């Protein structure tokens, strides 16, 4: 479960104090796919960075699976990002010289999982996201955008995280493929009993989500 309480992030821009996220609170249970919709500058990307422990809040608290990550030290935050969070990006961010299978195995290698188990788990996840077996050994350039995003989602699930954060996950996909990816993320959230949060400017994504929030001027409205 993700629980956010009174989260605020302030930046100093010259002499001006900018509040990118303002007193935001919400809860998303396990097994739920939720969207945060907002225009550019609404604060949704800053919120995602805070949830992913890529940035620290000015005030407020973030609880993931009952743990208050805002109280973690730097070393514990590194381990948290490595083992408890999965990231999915608009541009996929796959390693170009690795196959689809190797891309999914990579996070498990950093977590110290043995090679045989890494391969077995990666195959299972690629099947779950609907990538056909004949494409497991292909490099990203030999896959379509939708296929690359499926690999990216499988990679995000590799270490069985409690939270997956997706940044414009359908931004580079056509409408039909984007709808398939959204449906897949919703199904996987329930199947893997994890929380998935996607930030997007596309309001149509919220229609398929289990929960949705809208941000404007750093606030949830």
Image (spheres, rainbow, N blue to C red):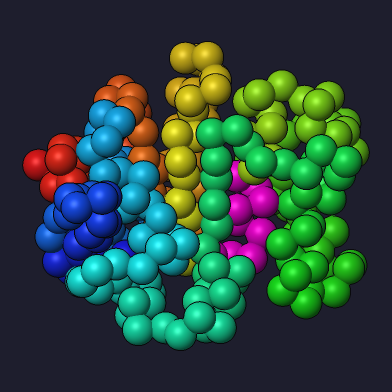
Residue 190 in sight from this viewpoint: no
Assess whether residue 158 is covered by the magenta stretch. Answer: yes
Residue 35 x, y percent position in the rendering: 32, 41
Quadrant housing the C terminus: top left
Q: Is residue 187 above or below residue 23?
A: above
What residue sits 89% from the left and 67% below the top?
A: 116
Residue 162 as seen in the image, left or right of residue 42: right
Assess whether residue 150 is covered by the magenta stretch. Answer: no
Residue 90 x, y percent position in the rendering: 54, 34
Residue 160 as seen in the image, left or right of residue 201: right
What is the span of residues highlighted in magenta in the rendered image? 153-161
What residue sits 29% from the left and 67% below the top?
A: 57
Residue 205 x, y percent position in the rendering: 34, 28
Residue 139 x, y percent position in the rendering: 85, 34
Residue 50 as seen in the image, left or right of residue 37: right
The quarter of the picture where residue 93 lies is: top right
Q: Is residue 137 above or below residue 160?
A: above
What residue sits 27% from the left and 56% below the top?
A: 11
Q: Nearer the viewer, residue 62 or 180?
A: 62
Quadrant housing the N terminus: bottom left
């Amino acid at each position: 479960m993700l629980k956010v309480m009174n989260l605020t992030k302030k930046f100093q821009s010259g002499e001006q104090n900018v509040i990118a996220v303002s007193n935001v609170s919400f809860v998303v249970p396990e097994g739920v796919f939720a969207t945060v919709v907002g225009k550019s500058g609404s604060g949704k990307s800053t919120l995602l960075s805070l949830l992913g422990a890529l940035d620290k809040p000015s005030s407020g608290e973030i609880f993931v699976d009952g743990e208050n990550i805002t109280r973690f030290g730097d070393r514990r935050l590194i381990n948290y990002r490595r083992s408890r969070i999965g990231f999915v990006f608009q541009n996929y961010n796959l390693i170009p010289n690795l196959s689809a299978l190797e891309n999914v195995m990579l996070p498990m290698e950093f977590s110290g999982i043995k090679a045989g188990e890494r391969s077995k788990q990666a195959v299972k996840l690629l099947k779950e996201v609907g990538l056909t077996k004949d494409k497991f050994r292909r490099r990203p350039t030999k896959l379509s955008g939708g296929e690359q995003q499926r690999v990216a989602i499988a990679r995000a699930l590799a270490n069985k995280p409690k939270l997956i954060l997706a940044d414009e996950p359908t931004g580079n996909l056509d409408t039909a493929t984007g709808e398939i990816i959204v449906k897949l993320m919703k199904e996987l959230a329930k199947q893997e009993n994890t929380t998935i949060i996607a930030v997007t400017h596309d309001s149509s994504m919220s229609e398929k989500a289990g929960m949705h929030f809208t941000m404007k001027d750093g606030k949830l409205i």
